[in-house]
Image (tube, grey):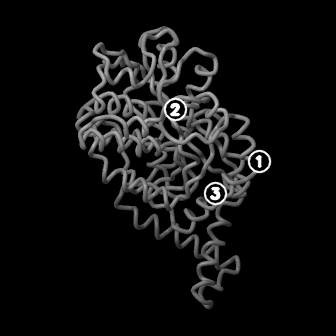
Amino acid sequence: MTSRHPNPVDRPARDGRFRFWRSSLRFAMAATLGGGILAACGSSSHSGAASSGGAAAFFKGKTITLIAPDKPGGGYDKYARLFAPYLASALGATINVVNVNGAGTLDGTNEMAKASPDGLTIGLVNVGGDTASLVEHLPGQSFDMTKLSWIGQPAVVPNVMVTQPSSSVKSFASMLSASSPVSVLDVRSGVGDMLNRVVFGAMSIPHHLVTGFDEVAALKQGFLAKDGQIMFESIPSMYSLIAGHEARPLLYVGTLTLPKYRTILQGVPDLASELAKAKLSSAQKAAVKEALTLSNLSDDFAGPPGIPAARLQVLRQAFLTAAKSSALQAAALKASIQVGPIDGATLATQVSQAVAQGSAIGPFVPTKG
């Protein structure tokens, strides 16, 4: 299912405690009717087991909305559709993928974040891009990332800088000593935008940004039309251009686990190694290191703030079960999608740290849209 449909939304904040109490009461009644009285008379371990069992039972036979904050075929959509059937199997539920595209990825994440925190609406979140938007004070973000219910990260999605095959730019290192600016195609949101601004800005590479693109598909069209020399986006979205010799890779960011990616980027340097060789100030190096950290946080599964702890734990375990299944791994390999899961608790900590420390990139990004 790819059509957009309404999701339940929260009542005003003043009703939050009542809603949580009412949800908990329903939960307790269901557990009691199902023999959950062990929680009242057993040990604390029995209580935890009953709570977990009740939370798992909640999802059985339910329909879950999984919001992909981009168009069908995009990076977030691919992860959503890869995981949906295996998450559904692990939960005993039905999962409908719904594409909510707009404002980069913010429209979809805003819709997910305002949904009822019952565990039946989840979505993918562009953590790196959204953190950069916070630093830049861009409008449109109506949620607090540190309060979302983090479920897990499918993988660290690598990014790649490419240029035109006929471009005069022969290597990333050559741009570090160039005197003439290069034209860089840019979507005004997301990880690619953040990498453009920080890498070119902090490493003092002469450049000018060619903006006006509202999504990666339009960016790729502009690149093929030779509206600019350079583009910096996720490897999954750039793979076909590189494989078809329509783009030449200059630099990559992240970890390459897929053999296809390692093969196609053989001999291409990574940003961390180039940073180690560059002569930069401490502030410049800090900014690039922070950009590296942020670029590793994207395509993450989360739910609205306030999902009950027991239900969130069930979602987290279902995510790991799905990610580690041999069937999903085989499907991911066939589709050239990296999978190397990070659990929800670890992800929540990484997100909080990224938001708290997201200031080093500030001097190299604008403070308004």
Q: Is residue 101 above or below residue 340?
A: above
- In terms of sequence position, does the residue under pointer 3 or pointer 1 come before the other? 3
User: Dot 2: within a 10 Å radius of its alpha carbon, few (fewer than 14), some, or many (20 or more) residues?
Assistant: many
> Which comes sooner in the sequence, label 2 or label 3?
2
How far apart, in angstroms, are the residues tagged by discs 3 and 1? 13 Å
Give percent across and percent down for residue 56. 66, 66
Residue, x 67% and y 41% (percent of image)?
Answer: 82
Q: Position of residue 280 (x, y in %)?
A: 27, 36
Q: Would you name the residue on which mark 3 appears?
A: 320
Q: Is residue 80 visible?
A: no
The amino acid on which the numbered mark 2 sits, given as a three-letter code, is: Ser
Q: Which residue is mark 1?
A: 327
Look at the image and tell me whether residue 323 can be seen: yes
Image: 324 above or below 183: below
Q: Quadrant of residue 239?
A: top right
Q: Residues within 10 Å of mark 3 (few under 14, many from 20)?
A: many
Mark 1 is on which residue type?
Ala
- Give the residue type that dot 3 points to: Leu
Image vertical order of residue 1 relative to residue 247, above or below: below
Indicate left or right for 323 with 250 as reference: right
Q: Which of the numbered marks, if any, corresponds to residue 234?
A: 2
Badge 3 marks a residue whose secondary structure is: helix
Q: Nearer the viewer, residue 180 or 276?
A: 276
Q: Residue at x 55, y 62 (%)?
A: 312
Q: What residue is drawn where x is 27% and y is 46%?
A: 359
Q: Which picture quadrant has residue 236?
A: top right
Work out whether mark 2 precedes mark 1 in sequence or the reverse, and give the earlier one.
2
Q: In this rendered view, identify the residue nearer to me: 251 or 86.
A: 251
Q: Is residue 83 left or right of residue 107?
A: right
Secondary-structure class at tag 1:
helix
